[in-house]
Each structure stands twice: as structure tokens, then as C-alpha cells.
Amino acid sequence: MAIAQDKTDNFDDLLTCTICLETFTRPIYLPCLHTFCKTCINTYIKSTVGKEKTTTNFQCPICRQNVLMGESTGNPETWAEKLPGNHFVTSMMDRQAIRRSEKICDSCKANNESKNALSWCIVCGEAFCESCEKCHKSFKMTAKHPIMLLKDIVTNKETLSISSLIYCEEHSGEVVKAYCVDHSVPLCTLCATLSHRKCEDVITIEKAASGITKSEQAMKLSTDLKETSKQLSELIQKRRDLKTDFEKEAEAIFTKVSTIKDNIVEHLNTIEERIKDEITKSKKEVGLKLFEKSTELESLKSTVDNWITIFDTCLQHGSEVQCLLELNRINENKVTFGDVFAKGTSEMKNVSMLLETNDLAEAFADQVASIGVIRLVESDARVPKLTFRKNANFQTGNINVIKVIELTGQSVFLSGLFMRDEFIFTHNQLLKILKYSHNGSRLSELKLSNKPCDIDEISGTIAAVSTDSNNIFTINMNDMTMCRVIGNTFSSHGFCHVNGEFILARNNTLTWISSSTGVKTEQAETNGDTFYIYAQDRKNYICADGTNTVSKTVNDTKVFTYTNDKLQNPRGIDVDTDGNVYICAFSSGNIHQLTKDGKLVRIIPAESVGIKQPCVIRFKKNSNQFLVTCYQTGKVVVCEIF
């Protein structure tokens, strides 16, 4: 395993194995360029292959990229032996050891001995102790090799290459001595003899490497890598922000569910109190009525009971005359008594209290099983695709046609754009949206009810299409299905989508409408011939401003106006990744390239890319590729600037 280290140099992290977290021993690297101790990666491979039961590949412990070893590589326990050594890391370890006066004699180490080195052979790239140096000088082949004392290397202010010899990755033990310019690969003697003997440009490795550290190519790669790292940092932060936003949304839903529950409970409590009040009121009213009726009957009963007492006493103790008189008196009152009794009997009603519940209340648990459904909705985060753009000088580079797509028809308005790795076109004669693969073969199509005019991307899979009937269609380009129709919009030919709005261009009018409702939010006039428009946002746009004029407007102020007699009837407009502006001159048959501040760079003849009347131009995002449609021939050419 690795040896513990004393971190003093600024490249110590480069020399630390991420598995054992110590300085490398026998460093080897994977195709993804991650480096590990040979023993560490061997242990990792055996463990990983055993768990995943694979016999052809394993994953890098850091980036999880697959390392394909193939079917004929034998037992996974031997895979580490087949991985290339990292000579650069080895040389950095040598440099560090020399600076710390810890370098061990390479010859002694090969014989399992350990002696501190005192000198360095620049040719062999090896360190020697005093006795091994003497032996090294005694051989005829190495006697004249220049030797430096390690202490002089440490104090030498000039940069001195102490790198060990670089060995061929294909032929074990062979030193890299040459470089094939034709194939951009380093060569050992066997490589040069066996595989590259017919190559025209084979030079020494020293000549190939001369000046590479300060070359434009190296500087460009360094800049690209730093820019890519910056983009990845931004993407990682974006992902973290999305996670934070998602967690906030989840907490908001928790709160909303709790609030809904509280509102439901509060509403049910209100209903309960209302019913209780009705019950109490009815109970009081009915009770009072029943009490009044009972009081009348009790009074009647009291009278009857009094009559019974009087008449029974009369019968037992009174004279017959007295009995006759009481009998007559009672009979006279019996008529009134009978009426009261009859009335009391007729008014006697059974009063019941019932609760008539509705169906929802009776089966509330069944009918209200949920207050909502949780859905996870994925949408395009509008993060630009991470790419290494090919080196391109947009202002002076050559333009090469890489693909021609023949669309049927002549005198046809065609528009198009790049969506992911596919081409999407509108064809106004066929009333169709056409989808083509990256190699130019037709994949699918969608028939429209109106003639399409222009197309623009809304998200990663959704595009909008303007038509000659003032309708705008939004379409899912994955399965070529209609999403929605925004009707009764304003007249347009070309248009673009920015920040939830469409900017429509037609003749001498620009119209801003909401992309969700189609309602007009703003309108402006131009000097005419405004068929297409390019916009970075709603207040920063470029469009034709006359039959041979194009203007850029920012915050309602024209920042440049470009006019040229060779710019007849400007149509499609787009901008490359460096900010240069491209304008299709429909009638004059050329494409005008301007700087970002409106200065003419060059006029590109349409015939130079195989078309006659350029109509629409669209660049692929973060790329040097663009497409141009031709009105006269119904042809689309895909080009690149290099």
C-alpha cells in the first residue's frame, strides 16, 4: 500500500491515492485519467467484480465510468497488471522526493535494498547512490550520460526535467522515442516499425513536445477545462438549488395539507355547532308547547279529581237532596269538561326529532378518501448542455458543408432548428412539421391544419410554431403530438419565445403577446420588411428595419443600425456563441456576418454553401454548427465554421 506523506508541496493532492489516502506506490491510471496505487485498484477490482458478478468491466471508484477490460483479459485478479502506469505522477513523486532529500536509489530499490540517492542520470531518469553511480559510469553504453547531484537539482532555479523514461503502453519495456503527427500518437521503436512505417510525418518525441507548454493548443485546452469546470460548478449549484427548492415545496405542501385539514375540522366544528343550536332551539320550542298542553290537562285532571272527592263525600255523608244537587252541577260542567277533553285529545301529537344527513356526510370517509394527489412533475431546467466546442474562429474560419437535407418543393418557406441531436423543420407547402435524425434521415412528421411559418424552442422537448392563420401551436417533439393551440393571436411570420412571451414579426410591426393567454402586452413599429426576429430577452432584439437594413434594439433604444446595398430583403437572423450576428439576405443571395456591435465582418455568398436564396439561419447551441434553409430549392444545408 502507499506510504504516509508529509504534505509540503502544492501538488501533494495530485500524488495522493483516493483509496488509501496516502502517497502513491506504483501509480496506474484508468481511461478516465483517475490514478490509484496498483495494489489499491487491484483490491477494489476484485471486490467490485465479486459483488457485481461481471467478467468484462468495472467502474472507476471516483467517477463511476465503466472501464471495459474485454472478454479476453483473463482473471479479474490480473486486470491491474494490464493498466498503464502513470509516468507523470511518478515523475512528480521523484521531484517531491528529491526536494525533500528522500529519494531512494533506483538500482538499490530494484534489488530490494534501500539507500539514499545522491545523483540523478538525466538520460535514464534514475537516481543513484554513490556506489551505483560508479557502476553506472563503468558501462560503455551509459558512461557518457550526464549526471547531476540531487542537491544541485534542488537548488537549481531553472526548471529541469527529471521525468523518468516514458514507456510504451502497447509494448512493455519499450521507451517512447517518436511521435506520429498523422495519427497524433506517441511511438516506441516497435510501434514506428510495425504500425506506422507508412505514415508520412513521424518525428522525435522531443521535437513533437517542443514548446507544447506554451502553445496555443495547450492554452486553449487549459482554458476549456477551466471553463468546463466552471460550468460544472454552476450545474452542481443549480442541482443543489433545485434540491433546496424541492424540499421547500415539500414543506409548503406539508403546511398546506395541515391547513386544509384544520379548515375542514373548523368547518365541521361550525356545522356541528349549527346543528346543536338548531337542536337546542327545537328542544326548547317543542318542550314549551308540550309543557303548556300538559299544564292544561293537569288543570283539567285536578278539577275532575275535585269533583270525585266532592261527589264521593256527598254519596257517603250527604242527603239525597244534596246528592241530587251535586249530580246536576257536575253534569252541567261535564259538557265543558268534555269539550276540553276532546280538544286535548285531538291536539295530542307525537313530536320526534330526526337528523336527515346527506350522502357525503354519511359516507364521508369513503367519498373523501384524499384531499389531493401528490405528483412529481419534471420540467426542463433550461441548463445548457455541457460541451467542448470545437476550436473555431468565427470571423475568419472556413465554412464547411457537412450535410445536405433535401426537402421537397420549390419557392417554399422553410424554417428549422436543432433540438437535442435532431433537426426539426417547418414546411409551409406540405403543412407539416418534419423531424430528422442527426445523420439526415427522416424520423417522423406531423400534419397541421394551417401553413407553418416559423418555429422556436420553448423547452427541451416542446417547440412553438407560428402559422398563416394567426394561430400558434405548441408541439411535443418527442412523440410529435399537439400540446395546445393559442388562437386569435396577432398576425406574424417569424417569431421567437423569450421569458414567457412571444415576439411576433410581420411587415413593419412587432407584437409581444403572453405565451399562455395570447393577450397582447406591447407593440412597436419598424421601417418594414420585418419577417423574422432574434431576441435575447423582450427588450434586447435584432430584426430587419427596412428592405436593406437591420437594427439592434436594447431597452427601446437602437444600439446599432446596419445598412448595405448587398443586403436585399433581410430574412432569418441568428447569433453564434461569440456574439457575431448572421443575416440571410433573401434577394441578394448572401449571408452577412456582423460583429456584436454591428460592424461588417464578411459577406458569405449563398452559392458557397450550395443554396440560392437563404431564408432562415439557426445555430446549434454552444456549437460551431448552423443550418440554412433555401427558399428557391427547398434545401437545407448544415454547416460548420472551423
Image: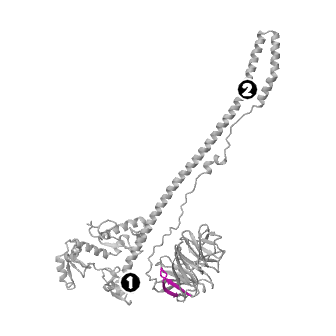
Mark 2 vs mark 1: in front = 2
The x, y position of residue 399, in whole percent, is 49, 86
In this rendering, the answer to whether 551 lies above or below 320 is below
Q: Residues within 10 Å of mark 1 (few under 14, many from 20)?
A: few
SS state under label 1: loop
Report if residue 578 lies within the magenta region: no
Q: Nearer the viewer, residue 333 or 1?
A: 333
Tell which of 438 and 251 is nearer to you. 251
Alpha carbons under labels 2 and 1: distance apart: 121 Å
Residue numbers of the magenta segment: 589-604
Query: Can you tell which quarter of the image residue 436 is in?
Result: bottom right
- Read off the residue under disc 2: 296
User: In the figure, is residue 393 to the left or right of 22?
Assistant: right
User: Label 1, on which residue?
Assistant: 184
Residue at x-position 82% and y-position 10%: 321
What secondary structure characterizes most of the magenta part?
Answer: strand
Quadrant location of the C terminus? bottom left
Q: Nearer the viewer, residue 335 or 150?
A: 335
Seen in the picture, residue 240 relative to 26 is either above or below; the reply is above
Instruction: Using the rendered image of the protein, determine whether residue 149 is visible from the camera's viewpoint.
Output: yes
Specify whether residue 595 is painted magenta.
yes
Q: Amino acid at mark 2?
A: Glu
Viewport quadrant of the N terminus: bottom left
Q: Secondary structure at mark 2?
A: helix
Amino acid residing under circle 1? Ser
Outermost front residue: 557
The mark that comes first in sequence, 2 or 1, is 1
- Residue count near mark 2 (Cα–Cα under 10 Å), binned few <14, some 14–19, many ≥20: some
Residue at image location 43% in from the left, 71% down from the top: 231
